[in-house]
């Protein structure tokens, strides 16, 4: 009676009475090249084409490279493909795989010749998948009990939370977050310090929450990063404030959104306080001579001729007082208070 082969791992099944005296070799091959590899084998698959079928044998008498389809774990590497690719497994063979897609492209797992469901494995993702010989399925779509993530958790699809979500680090979502089940998955009231989080309307994703914090008209400031907040937050249109522009509170004759002012100013005559300048007279005197005629006499005294005086007039004299001197050079002065320089952006849409 000739041997047959199992449909899943292609194990050689000997007929009754077959291989008398040599059946040990066949049994050893089954254990060494099939059972052991199906349980613990790791096979690297160099992807050179799309689609590419995993190799497989009926029975096994050689290395795992010739029987990739039975390996417990598969590592896909780029052997020359430059696009997303498909890896096919033997038709009708049921199998559980651990797969590491160590390429830059999406790997799709599919049963050869089947139109059944497939599984897409993103670049650099390690996951578990299984096939029933027609369709491929994800090895895990949920968890029971507590689930802890000690590293980064990236969600690229939609996330549904049926219980309490406590976040102590940063959570990044590119899809929607839907909270169902009520209970503690509700919006916390003012002053509530429990682990409640907001409903879907408030935190479908981090961008929505930040958009609520930074509505149109908000100002964002940063002392070290000049990156546009649209890039940092993933929403809105932001315009950088003019160089040197400062913020001023609304009111007191100033309206929100108005601009004005300058970094320096120069005083004009109208800006100067009323004042006066003191002038000091240094004092002065005039010299003169008395002009007289000969033989005239002074009352009760000698004649002028006897005084030896001649006719003369007073000389011209000046006070020595000039106008006040010009002072100052009109240099502008700064009007800026002590400051901290920051990058500032205003959300305009």
Image (spheres, rainbow, N blue to C red):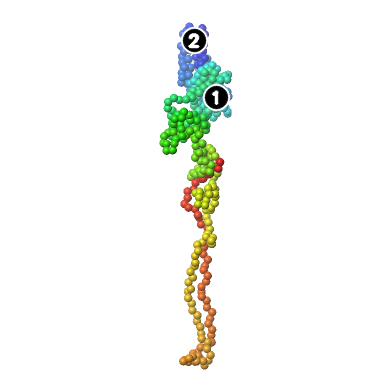
Q: Secondary structure at mark 2?
A: loop
Q: Residues within 10 Å of mark 1 (few under 14, many from 20)?
A: some
Query: Foreground residue, 101 or 65?
Result: 101
Q: Is residue 243 among what the camera can see?
A: no
Residue 347 vertical placement versus 158 (above, below): below
- Measuring from the top left, give residue 215's x and y in whole percent: 52, 41
Q: Secondary structure at mark 1?
A: strand
Residue 314 vertical placement versus 158 (above, below): below
Mark 2 → mark 1, Cα distance in angstroms: 36 Å
Q: Give residue 14's mark.
A: 2
Which quarter shows the C terminus? top right
- Measuring from the top left, give residue 256's x and y in whole percent: 53, 48
**For the point 58% across and 24% down, which residue is it?**
50
Residue 86, located in which quarter of the rendered image? top right
Q: Which residue is mark 1?
A: 108
**For the point 54% across and 20% down, which residue is it?**
135
Q: Nearer the viewer, mark 2 or mark 1?
A: 1
| Number of callouts | 2
- Tell which circle, 2 or 1, labels the residue nearer the N-terminal end: 2
Q: Residues within 10 Å of mark 2 (few under 14, many from 20)?
A: some
Residue 338 vertical placement versus 297 (above, below): above
- Measuring from the top left, give residue 267's x and y in whole percent: 53, 59
Query: Foreground residue, 314 or 31?
Result: 314
């Amino acid at each position: 009676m000739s041997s047959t082969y199992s449909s899943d791992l292609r194990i050689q099944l000997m007929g009754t009475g077959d291989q008398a005296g040599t059946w040990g070799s066949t049994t050893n091959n089954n254990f060494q090249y099939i059972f052991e590899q199906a349980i613990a084998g790791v096979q690297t698959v160099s992807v050179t084409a799309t689609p590419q079928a995993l190799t497989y044998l009926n029975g096994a008498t050689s290395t795992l490279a010739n029987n990739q389809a039975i390996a417990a774990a598969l590592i896909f590497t780029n052997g020359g493909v430059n696009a997303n690719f498909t890896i096919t497994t033997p038709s009708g063979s049921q199998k559980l795989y651990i797969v590491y897609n160590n390429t830059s492209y999406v790997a799709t797992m599919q049963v050869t010749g089947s139109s059944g469901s497939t599984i897409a494995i993103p670049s650099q993702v390690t996951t578990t998948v299984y096939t029933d010989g027609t369709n491929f399925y994800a090895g895990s779509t949920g968890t029971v009990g507590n689930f802890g993530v000690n590293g980064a958790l990236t969600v690229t699809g939609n996330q549904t939370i049926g219980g309490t979500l406590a976040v102590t680090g940063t959570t990044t979502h590119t899809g929607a977050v839907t909270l169902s089940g009520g209970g503690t998955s509700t919006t916390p009231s003012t002053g509530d310090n429990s682990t409640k989080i907001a409903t879907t309307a408030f935190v479908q994703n981090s961008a929505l929450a930040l958009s609520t914090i930074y509505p149109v008209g908000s100002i964002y400031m940063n002392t070290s990063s000049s990156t546009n907040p649209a890039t940092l937050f993933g929403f809105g249109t932001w315009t950088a404030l003019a160089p040197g522009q400062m913020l001023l509170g609304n009111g007191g004759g100033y309206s929100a959104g108005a601009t004005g002012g300058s970094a320096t100013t120069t005083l004009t005559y109208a800006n100067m306080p009323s004042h006066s300048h003191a002038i000091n007279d240094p004092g002065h005197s005039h010299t003169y001579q008395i002009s007289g005629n000969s033989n005239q006499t002074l009352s009760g005294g000698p004649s002028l001729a006897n005084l030896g005086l001649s006719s003369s007039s007073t000389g011209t004299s000046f006070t020595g007082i000039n106008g006040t001197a010009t002072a100052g050079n009109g240099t502008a002065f700064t009007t800026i208070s002590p400051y901290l320089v920051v990058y500032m952006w205003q959300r305009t849409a």
